[in-house]
Image (cartoon, helix red, strand yellow):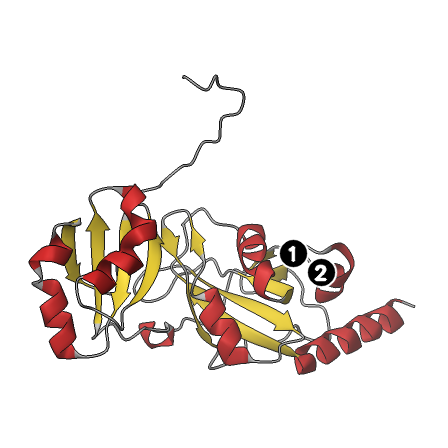
Amino acid sequence: MGDRNRSFQNSNENQTQKISKSVFMTNFPKDATARDLWKACNTYGTIVDVFIPYKGSKAGKRFAFVRFIKVMNLDRLVENLCTIWIGRFHLHANHVRFERPQKPNNPIPKGKNSEVYKNSFSSVLKYGHISFVILDPTLVLDESCIKEHDFKLSLMGKVKDVFAIPNLPVTIIKEGFQNVKLTYLGGTWVLFELDSTATKEKFLNHAGVGSWFTTIKHATNSFVNDERTVWVSIEGLPIRA
């Protein structure tokens, strides 16, 4: 009976492997758990597996593999995952170059060099959560796996007043810049994507635009927002308060 159950579980895992897509992720908090990544990424797809090795990359960064099913467009999924923030950390995602090895068909005795998994794929499908522990060996990927955005035509600005952010599109058009894409980065930071190098330089040195910001600088992939804006809604105040 035990062999039959193991064979059934292995069959389910093999089937899941065939229909799933794995995404490599990094740049998340040191104390983040598999459950934290699951909750953060679950908005963009159906997750069946979150795996965080104990060992980090050669650069000392933690990384994870998040496996999805029902993926219609992997490129779009990766792009969506790259918009996620966990606290002050902006997640980086990319396609997996090499799938991590599947669990062996026969159980491996727990020992110094064995892999120990706390949950199986079948438990994920049944209970909706999973946590993994891996001791040795670990697949370590280099930094080339990180999805880097091209910011050659982008600038970042820190506004003087957070209430000015909703009016920035109109303000920028009035200053003579028509084709500027704005993205809110959190806190008082905004990302500007421009259409040419000349426009970027003109925008960077424009006195009218600069009057709205304390800082305008070149955008980079290493940017980490050091601010957090909180909105508090209060009901029941007198009109004259």
Residue 158 appears left or right of 235: left
Q: Rounded to the nearest whole Å, what is the CA distance between mark 1 and mark 2?
A: 6 Å
- Disc 1 residue type (three-letter): Ile
Q: Is residue 138 visible?
A: no
Q: Is residue 85 above or below residue 163?
A: below
Labelled disc at residue 130 = 1
Give the position of the N terminus as an image quadrant: bottom right
Q: Is residue 3 visible?
A: yes
Residue 46 appears left or right of 187: right
Q: Are marks 1 and 2 in contact (CB under 8 Å)?
A: yes
Q: Is residue 184 above or below residue 162?
A: below
Element on which disc 1 rests = loop
Residue 47 appears left or right of 151: right
Labelled disc at residue 124 = 2
- Residue visible at 86% across and 69% down in the picture: 5
Q: Give the image location of residue 221, x and y in percent.
A: 27, 65
Residue 132 appears left or right of 162: right
